């Protein structure tokens, strides 16, 4: 039959081209109307908080739309806080949090909607988390079957948002390649903490059929319903790599940090003198000590030059090791 003839049923058409041209972006670089999106991240990265925030922003900008979150894998306290915030923002008539419907009953509901060919073009569906939609998150056929159903919902016009763990409680929940292959956009959420503040970045995590761009948000862990987007995105993976201290340096970095706590207005010269006088218990020599001080400038402490003197100050939000 040949490759050309085999591809006739799935070839690009003028109608499909027009649909792509008229693509309705609901949240720039992240959510496109009528597509299936997957957001993966470690437990505690802020997936639920960020996607709840984004959904509320979409609803405020699109009064014709409604949303339902199947909240299967979160704390009840978090659900209560989000519910109160939805009411405060006047969205309770268009944003439902479903706490109690079982995953098998949700599955039956989806089947009925697909059979009835319901128009879901004004609806956003958030499923938290995807592992409850599949019988085995690490089984190819199980994931393919579950994702096929969500794709059927997008054919009815639904905008689908799936949340998934990369790991939880020390176990791998990343799933199989089908998650990337059978969704329209795969995103990764990474985060770091500074005291009670959490900073999370949403970035392209794999196959993405939309014009994705990184976006960074911050929120207080004690008040996760109030989310602020930062002007510039932060590459959290790169930041965390830069802040990792190799095992051989941990003792020395901690010794320097303890010294800086007791001597907050010191200089590099002071630290070198402390090394010479054995008040600073670092294991490296003087040359290596200077390399160490410059290597972790900006992550554990800050170096500033004033003429010939190089001052060093402990960073209050320095990475804990």
Image: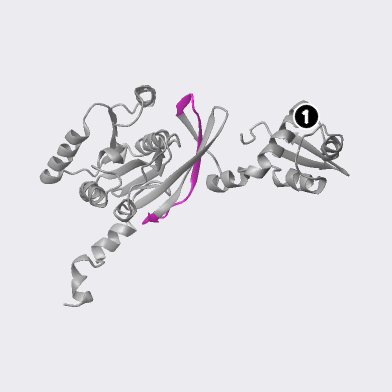
Which residue has dot 1 on it? 264
Instruction: State the residue in front, 292 or 294.
Output: 292
Secondary structure of the residue carrying tag 1 is loop
Q: Residues within 10 Å of mark 1 (few under 14, many from 20)?
A: some
Point out residue 183 in the picture as x, y percentages from the top left corner: 31, 52
- As for residue 213 lying within the magenta part, the answer is yes
Instruction: State the residue in front, 11 or 1.
Output: 1
Q: Looking at the image, which residue is at 84% across and 40% down?
A: 272
Q: Looking at the image, which residue is at 66% across and 39% down?
A: 250
Q: Is residue 284 above or below residue 210?
A: above
Give the quarter of the figure containing the C terminus. top right
Instruction: State the residue in front, 98 or 172.
Output: 172
Point out residue 261 in the picture as x, y percentages from the top left corner: 74, 28
Q: How many marks?
A: 1
User: What residue range appears in magenta?
Assistant: 207-225
Q: Looking at the image, which residue is at 57% across and 28% down?
A: 195
Query: Left or right: 266 with respect to 321?
Result: right
Instruction: State the residue in front, 19 or 276.
Output: 276
Furthest residue to the right? Answer: 308
């Amino acid at each position: 039959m040949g490759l050309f003839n085999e591809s006739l049923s799935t070839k690009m058409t003028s109608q499909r081209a027009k649909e792509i041209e008229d693509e309705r972006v609901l949240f720039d670089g992240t959510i496109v109307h009528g597509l299936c999106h997957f957001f993966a991240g470690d437990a505690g990265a802020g997936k639920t908080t960020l996607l709840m925030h984004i959904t509320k922003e979409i609803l405020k900008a699109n009064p014709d739309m409604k949303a339902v979150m199947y909240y299967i894998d979160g704390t009840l306290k978090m659900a209560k806080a989000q519910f109160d915030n939805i009411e405060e923002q006047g969205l309770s008539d268009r944003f439902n949090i479903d706490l109690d419907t079982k995953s098998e009953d949700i599955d039956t509901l989806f089947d009925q909607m697909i059979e009835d060919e319901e128009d879901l073009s004004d609806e956003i569906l958030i499923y938290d988390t995807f592992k409850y939609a599949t019988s085995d998150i690490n089984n190819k056929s199980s994931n393919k079957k579950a994702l096929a159903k969500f794709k059927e919902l997008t054919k009815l016009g639904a905008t689908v948002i799936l949340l998934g763990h990369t790991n939880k409680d020390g176990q791998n929940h990343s799933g199989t390649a089908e998650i990337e292959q059978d969704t329209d956009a795969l995103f990764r959420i990474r985060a770091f903490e500074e005291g009670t503040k959490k900073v999370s970045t949403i970035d392209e995590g794999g196959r993405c059929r939309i014009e994705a761009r990184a976006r960074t948000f911050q929120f207080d862990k004690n008040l996760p319903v109030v989310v602020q987007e930062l002007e510039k995105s932060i590459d959290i993976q790169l930041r965390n790599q830069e802040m990792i201290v190799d095992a051989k340096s941990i003792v020395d970095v901690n010794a320097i940090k303890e010294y800086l706590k007791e001597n907050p207005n010191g200089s590099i010269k002071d630290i070198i003198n402390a090394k010479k006088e054995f008040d600073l218990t670092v294991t490296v020599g003087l040359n290596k000590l200077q390399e160490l001080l410059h290597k972790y400038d900006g992550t554990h402490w800050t170096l500033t030059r004033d003429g010939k003197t190089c001052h060093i100050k402990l960073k209050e939000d320095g990475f804990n090791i």
